[in-house]
Amino acid sequence: MERAYGLHLVFDMMTKLGHNSDGIIWTPVKCPYVPGICDKLLKWKPPEMTTADFRINAKWSKEHKPIYYLEVLSHVTYKFYDHFQPEPDIATKWKEHLPDGRIAEFRYDPDWKVTIVEQGYAPMTRKGGWRFVRFRDDKDAANDEIDMVYQKNNFLLIWIIYVQLGKPVKKDYLSHH
């Protein structure tokens, strides 16, 4: 596919592919190929399909309640990326056996309320957080922090458009503008 205009044609072609397509990547015509991450690309996915793979760091608090953190790969070790609060039914399942160290796929939900628990501080609630999608037993590592910076930059660009529109950047908006 090669059009930056006529997006309705691109979306129509996507439905006829022999495989599922979860988005569009805009590539500048005059940019040479760059192996790895190219910051000149813009990747768009419907908001409900935009995901990232993190390693779950799960610990028990002094009150014997699970605390979850999401981690990204940083060179050869993992480092903190964000707090995470699973949905109540998932949290109940996980109490039997915490998924500490497992790689999982998450999607960002700007309306999800996350309670942040840190030792020595009163819990606080934040709007906007990651929601569990599925375990990724087919992967042995989480996203690299460089990938997350790239995804975050794309997310921020889409988020700026979202704020200007007051709603997510969905297929219909792209097709009509």
Image (cartoon, rainbow, N blue to C red):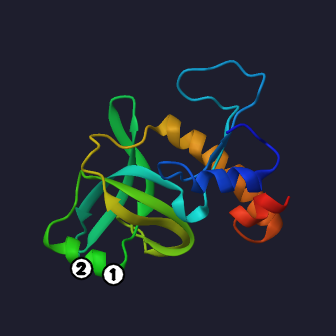
Residue at the spot 51% in from the left edge and 38% down from the top edge: 147
Q: Which labelled disc corresponds to residue 88?
A: 1
Looking at the image, residue 137 sits to the left or right of residue 82; the answer is: left
Whether residue 131 appears in this view of the structure is yes
Q: Dot 1, how many residues are within 10 Å of its Cα: few (below 14), some (14-19), or many (20+)?
A: few
Where is residue 105, by image quadrant?
A: bottom left
Residue 165 is situated, as x and y percent measured from the top left of the image, at 81, 67
Say which amino acid is labelled 1. Answer: Pro
Q: Quadrant of the N terminus?
A: top right
Q: Secondary structure at mark 1?
A: helix
Residue 116 is situated, as x and y percent measured from the top left of the image, at 44, 69
Q: Which labelled disc corresponds to residue 92?
A: 2
Viewer-nearest residue: 101 or 169: 169
Count of numbered marks: 2
Say which amino acid is labelled 2. Answer: Thr
Q: Quadrant of the C terminus?
A: bottom right
Whether residue 118 appears in this view of the structure is no
- Whether pointer 1 and pointer 2 mark residues with C-beta atoms closer than 8 Å, the reply is yes
Q: Secondary structure at mark 2?
A: helix
